Image: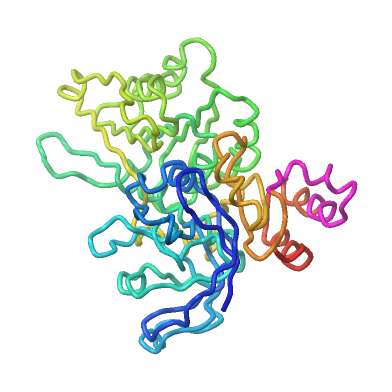
């Protein structure tokens, strides 16, 4: 069968085209991809081409399908997996597979498997490692967001603390403790706020910082102080653009500091700010993925020695983290719609991916069977003056606090132009 898809041919070379998919083997599964959210990692792969560790050397002759945050429906199941998967089921996918000890994963390395395609062939290594996951919610876009959410969940699980005189690391955040998410009003920060106030192991106080008041206001309108309080968390949004941000942060804790600090921007002053607000036995997690291989920051090693300060970095989540994300979404405990600020069709993928750092806002969501320019949700009303579909989408999003929703998804899939 034929599928339209976006493939990587070399550095800065993404092309939308049509590919003939091979008939699946007994140990493969054919899926229909409905949604994919574009990750900064795809931008990095597009910029580097075969210099990227996950991208093969021969993409000029054998291009690969990009996109790894995808969700859809199973179309056909090879006989080997017939007792585990059925046609018509929804699926999520954990792209971090260990492909024979290499770094090759969906969205980087395979000619027929990725997120920015209408149909894909899932290879047996994905199922063998339990990376093709059952998904029970109605919204496809939530399934796409489960991959970035798994990265956030992994960050919470990677935190560790100790007891005086004991060398055992107690994994996870301090339950009921003080947590700060620095530079936390971006898309991944919003996901972290959502998880922090709705997971089973919560902080007692959560302080979210940013230097952009509009971003903080948007975050506060999505994940409210009242909702956090109802879930047992004191939530504070703090603009740190003024004088003495460290003093303001410490004052919120009566100068006791923070048990858990998550840094969501690869900026040395933010990292150093996080170091300065750690409590005794505090753990700082450098979450943000830097593009500068020489990024460095000052860290107080006097406090590492005498105040038991810890430093950890996480890059991605594992399969159990993603299963937790999918289960919490299906149970209605997580509502990551706030991460999405733009929506487009498969035709918008190449341009959007290649220009991703220049496009403001949060996650860019793609529906792979439609033709639609990548459009900010905030621009729907203006475009709706000339296009009734955008007018209807604007009205739906307004009823959902300006956010994308399952209702908007269903409307778009029913009314958008097919690609």
How far across and down, in percent of the image, does residue 139 sit? 61, 64
Quarter of the picture containing the C terminus is bottom right
How far across and down, in percent of the image, does residue 262 sit? 39, 35
Q: Is residue 339 visible?
A: no
Residue 307 against residue 171 in the figure, above or below: above
**Extreme right residue here?**
385
Residue 120 against residue 163 in the figure, above or below: below
Q: Is residue 124 left or right of residue 385?
A: left
* Main secondary structure found in the magenta portion: helix
Residue at position x 71%, y 46% from top? 375
Q: Is residue 93 left or right of residue 361?
A: left
Q: Which residues are magenta?
A: 374-394
Residue 386 painted magenta: yes
Instruction: Give whichever of 217, 64 is nearer the camera.
Output: 64
How far across and down, in percent of the image, does residue 373 sit? 71, 50
Q: Is residue 113 left or right of residue 293?
A: right
Number of disc labels: 0
How far across and down, in percent of the image, does residue 157 sit? 32, 49
Q: Is residue 108 visible?
A: yes
Quarter of the picture containing the N terminus is bottom right
Tell me how the rendering is colored. Answer: rainbow
């Amino acid at each position: 069968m034929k599928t339209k898809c976006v493939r990587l041919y070399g550095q800065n070379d993404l092309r939308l085209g049509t590919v003939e998919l091979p008939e699946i083997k007994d140990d493969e599964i054919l899926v229909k991809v409905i949604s994919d959210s574009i990750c900064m990692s795809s931008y990095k792969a597009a910029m580097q081409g075969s210099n990227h560790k996950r991208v093969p050397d021969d993409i000029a002759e054998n291009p690969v399908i990009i996109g790894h945050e995808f969700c859809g429906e199973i179309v056909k199941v090879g006989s080997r997996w017939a007792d585990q998967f059925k046609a018509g089921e929804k699926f999520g996918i954990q792209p971090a597979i260990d492909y024979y000890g290499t770094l090759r994963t969906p969205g980087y390395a395979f000619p027929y498997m990725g997120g920015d395609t209408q149909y894909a062939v899932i290879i047996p290594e994905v199922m063998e490692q339990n990376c093709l996951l059952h998904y029970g919610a109605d919204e496809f876009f939530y399934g796409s967001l489960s991959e970035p959410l798994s990265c956030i969940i992994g960050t919470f699980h990677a935190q560790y603390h100790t007891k005086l005189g004991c060398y055992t690391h107690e994994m996870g955040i301090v339950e009921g403790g003080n947590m700060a998410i620095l530079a936390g009003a971006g898309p991944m920060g919003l996901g972290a706020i959502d998880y922090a106030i709705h997971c089973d192991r919560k902080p007692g106080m959560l302080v979210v910082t940013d230097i952009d008041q509009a971003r903080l206001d948007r975050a506060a309108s999505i994940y409210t102080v009242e909702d956090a309080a109802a879930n047992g968390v004191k939530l504070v949004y703090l603009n740190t653009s003024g004088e003495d941000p460290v003093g303001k942060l410490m004052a919120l804790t009566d100068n006791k500091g923070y048990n858990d600090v998550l840094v969501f921007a690869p900026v040395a002053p933010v990292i150093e700010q996080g170091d300065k607000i750690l409590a005794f036995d505090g753990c700082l997690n450098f979450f943000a993925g830097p593009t500068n291989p020489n990024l460095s920051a000052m860290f107080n090693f006097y406090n590492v020695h005498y105040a038991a300060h810890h430093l950890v970095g996480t890059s991605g989540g594992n399969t159990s983290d993603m299963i937790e994300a999918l289960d919490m979404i299906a149970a209605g405990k997580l509502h990551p719609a706030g991460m999405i600020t733009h929506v487009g069709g498969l035709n918008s993928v190449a341009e959007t991916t290649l220009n991703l750092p220049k496009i403001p806002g949060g996650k860019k969501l793609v529906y792979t069977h439609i033709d639609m320019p990548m459009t900010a949700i905030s621009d729907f009303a203006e475009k709706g003056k000339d296009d009734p579909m955008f007018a209807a989408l604007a009205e739906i999003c307004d009823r959902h606090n300006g956010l994308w929703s399952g209702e908007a998804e269903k409307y778009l899939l029913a009314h958008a132009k097919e690609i």
